[in-house]
Image (spheres, grey):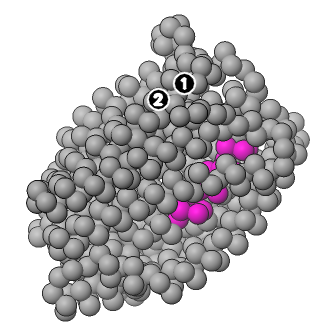
Amino acid sequence: MQTRTRDMTHGEPAKLIFFFLIPILAGNVLQQFYSLVDSFIIGQINGVTALSAVSISGWLDWLVLSIMIGLTQGFSIQVAHDFGAGNTRALRHTVGQSILLTCSGIVLLEICAQLALRPIVTLMQTPPEIFELEILYLRVIFCGIPMVMGVNLLSGFLRSVGNSRTPLIAMISSTITNALLDLLFVAVFRWGIAGAALATIIAQGASCIVCLIAVLRLPLLHPASEDLTPDFPAMRKLLHISAPIVLGNVVISIGGLVLQTVVNGFGYLFAAGYNAAGRLQGPIEIAGVSISSATGTFIAQNYGARNIARVRDGFRKSFFIILGTCAVISGTVLIFGPQIVLLFLNDDPAIVEQVLSYAIRFLHYMGAGLPFLYLLFLYRSSLQGLGDTFIPMLSGFIELVLRITSALVLPRFFGMSGVYAAEILAWIGAAIFLIFGYYRRMHHISSL
């Protein structure tokens, strides 16, 4: 495996972003395929009840995952700044301190996640038909926190220095492993959703090993022994970047949990339809997340090099790319979404028909609101690339307020349609706030 870096402070911005984007996009496609395989196998073999249990667990799973992503993403931003500035000594120190903070985070998060699981699932008013299934699935999934934290940290390091190819290779190995083990554990051994969760953990471990090998082959990312000694000022700096991302992700997740609680109140069939469509939200987001991620790394490296004109140029080109992509994805969702959802459903025909009707209505709302979601991703990643994680954090609070308010108020007047609209309104409010925040930040930087 050849390990490469890419300096994005020189060359045509659109070309650099595009070629850096391709492996990220491919990796995200595989990650969503990974999730869809789980849903397909569980839905076809164990039925709507098991699929609903896995789907409903999504927001709680994301709450824990978002903490891990937020921490490691913040660390990666500083690595990209050090790389863009050409400061190898500082880069290695950042890597060492990030490793120490990650190890501490794994222990704390594992304990909290396992202890809080049952109380939170109870508060969510999870339907009794799937309560214990959801507990079982998440118990196993949370055992994989060390692997997930590790792969996010290591792949973040690699992307920060311009290597998006190795994380793609890691995702390919993870996807293949997960699919094969899903078939073995669920279809052959009949271990149900616990088998699907175990397959996910082992697959994440495989991905982590691939990224670790690549990092070990890249001396630039090797911390010295003194870099692995706690340096509290350096740790505070890293947490200063990461904490707002974590907090923003957490409040978004809390809003999602409240919305899921409202969804659960309409019964498990509505919850199954809503969450079956929600399983497509990940694939729908792929292009927006990938373009935004590539743009964020480009901006972070060039901001580290203090080339603001280049930051503006790269962002402008990404803006038009992401809007054009969004138009294609929205049309695809509206045309083919129902057929894809139907692949997950295998139960009594009357149940399938009812669940599908709920899913189709949510897909229509998602297709209409997608431009705001894509802009949300782009402006948030760009601000983070500029080292501003505070405004993205505040946008998370806006999402929280809008999602909770809409979920609690709109269904009283519009019934199920109010539940569908809650998610879209949260996207719109957060996107508008981030747009103003980005241009304010750029004006401030330009005036320095």
Q: Residue at x 46, y 24 (%)?
A: 99
Task: Categorize mark 2 by other alpha carbons within 10 Å: few (<14), some (14-19), many (20+).
Answer: some
Residue 130 visible, this angle: yes
Residue 291 is a magenta residue: yes
For the C terminus, the image quarter is top right
Q: In the rendered image of this protein, does residue 273 appear above or below residue 241?
A: below
Q: Which mark is residue 189?
A: none
- Residue 278 place in picture, x, y as percent: 39, 71
Tell me the CA gap for discs 2 and 1. 6 Å
Mark 2 = which residue? 213
Which is more toward the observer, 176 or 118? Answer: 176
> In which quarter of the view is residue 81 placed?
top right
> In which quarter of the view is residue 445 placed?
top right
Cβ–Cβ under 8 Å for marks 2 and 1: yes
Residue 342 is left or right of residue 439, and the answer is: left
Task: Categorize mark 1 by other alpha carbons within 10 Å: few (<14), some (14-19), many (20+).
Answer: some
Q: Please, what is the three-letter code of the amino acid marked with disc 2?
A: Ile
Mark 1 = which residue? 217
Which stretch is magenta? 285-299
